[in-house]
Amino acid sequence: MQIGITIGTIAEGITESFVSYIKPKKDVMWQASRIHGIKAKDLKDAPDFFSLFPKIKSLLNNRVLVAHSCGTEKRFLRAFAGQKFEPWVDSLTLAKAALPDLEKHRLGELLPYLGSDFNELPATKNRQWHDALYDAAASFCFVQNLVHTLDIADQPLSLLLNPNTKRYHALRHGS
């Protein structure tokens, strides 16, 4: 397993990042290893999930969280009983509302919407899709660039939290 977190603002972009392998409770299945590129040697000396809690909590508390199809991240963080990390901006739901004409809305399909310097960011250097830090940076950069493109930085956060296709259509077409 791996966790990747990027911290940033719409105005400044990514200002901080954190990535760590996490020692799993059971062996990593070959399919997951193939998709994520994580090998047994990567996990050998990795910390366990709960030992990372203080760091994760310090990075995520009192922040707007962004993830692509955030269900996995929410389940992951529920392991910290009594902690409520929110609100969540789901970049998949946002992409479907803002870009309904795209055939697919997978994170990899949103590359043209991440910004020209995306692959030069420290969080993405020498990383690729399905790496936790790369995917965290991609989700954030998609939201950041959408906010800039549609000029909605001064709009209520609810526009990102509860995306509405009709509202985004109007924003794209200047109505």
Image: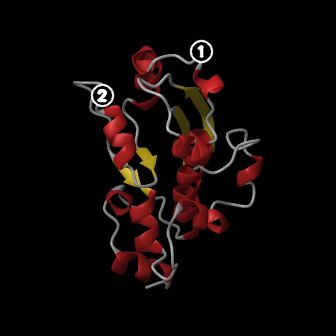
Q: Residue at x 42, y 31 (%)?
A: 60
Please name which of the two marks, 1 or 2, marks the residue nearer to the observer. Answer: 1
Residue under numbered circle 1 = 45
Above or below 166: residue 26: above
Residue 38 seen in render: yes
- Quadrant in the rendering for residue 77: top left
Residue 10 seen in render: no
Q: Amino acid at mark 1?
A: Asp
Image coords of residue 136 (percent x, y): 54, 45
Q: How many marks?
A: 2
Dot 2 lies on which element? loop
Above or below 147: residue 59: above
Q: 156 or 39: nearer the eye?
A: 39
Image coords of residue 72 (percent x, y): 38, 45
Above or below 39: residue 165: below
Image coords of residue 91 (percent x, y): 45, 58
Taking the image as shown, residue 48 lies to the left or right of residue 6, namely left
Q: Residue furthest left?
A: 82
Q: CA distance from mark 1 to mark 2?
A: 21 Å
Taking the image as shown, residue 109 lies to the left or right of residue 52, namely right
Q: Amino acid at mark 2?
A: Ala
Residue under numbered circle 2 = 79
